[in-house]
Image (cartoon, grey):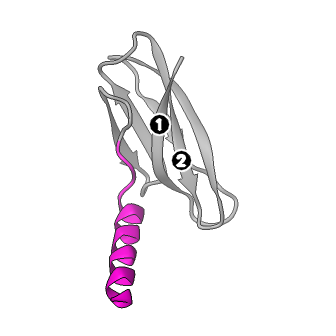
């Protein structure tokens, strides 16, 4: 029984690592670029005005947030890129900050 539970836990963790989290903000969608190191967020609906994507980054050694450029609703996207001096940085999800 313990082996089955362990296998299910490993499968869930592998799925979570393989596919970044989906957008949390309604009316926004994302595109992952540069092998998953950058997220570009477009918002067609939502609060009027400007927004900023905040990428949740990891490199296997730690986690941090990386703020992106300022985008406009139904206009310019916001781009957030994960950078790191150590390890291979990847986007592990994001959220939208409304400005």
Q: Which residue is identified by label 2?
A: 56
Q: Say which label, 2 or 1, has the lower sequence index.
A: 2
Is 68 situated above or below 50? below
How many numbered discs? 2
Q: Residue furthest right?
A: 85
* Picture quadrant of residue 60: bottom right
Q: Camera-side residue: 35 or 9?
A: 9
Is the stretch drawn in magenta largely helix, strand or loop?
helix
Question: Residue at left 38%, top 88%?
Answer: 2
Residue 94 screen position, x and y as percent: 47, 42
The stretch of residues the image draws in magenta is: 1-22
Q: Residue furthest front?
A: 1
Question: Residue at left 33%, top 77%?
Answer: 8
Say whether residue 42 is left or right of residue 62. Answer: left
Q: Tag 2's secondary structure?
A: strand
Is 15 situated above or below 81? below
* Picture quadrant of residue 28: top left
Residue 49 screen position, x and y as percent: 44, 11
Which part of the image, by quadrant, shows the N terminus?
bottom left
Say whether residue 60 is left or right of residue 43. Answer: right
> In the rendered structure, does residue 6 fall within the stretch colored magenta?
yes
Is 5 situated above or below 99? below
Q: Camera-side residue: 87 or 34?
A: 87
Q: Are marks 2 and 1 in contact (CB under 8 Å)?
A: yes
Question: Residue at left 34%, top 66%?
Answer: 15
Residue 95 screen position, x and y as percent: 47, 36
Per the rendering, the mark at residue 71 is none
Q: Which residue is identified by label 1?
A: 95
Q: Tag 1's secondary structure?
A: strand
């Amino acid at each position: 029984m313990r082996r089955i539970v362990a296998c299910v836990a490993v499968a869930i963790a592998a799925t979570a690592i393989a596919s970044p989290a989906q957008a949390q903000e309604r009316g926004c969608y994302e595109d992952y670029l540069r092998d998953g190191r950058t997220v570009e967020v477009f918002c067609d609906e939502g609060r009027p005005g400007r927004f900023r994507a905040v990428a949740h980054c990891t490199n296997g050694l730690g986690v941090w947030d990386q703020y992106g450029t300022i985008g406009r609703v139904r206009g310019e996207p916001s781009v957030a890129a994960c950078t790191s001096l150590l390890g291979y940085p990847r986007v592990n999800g994001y959220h939208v900050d409304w400005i």
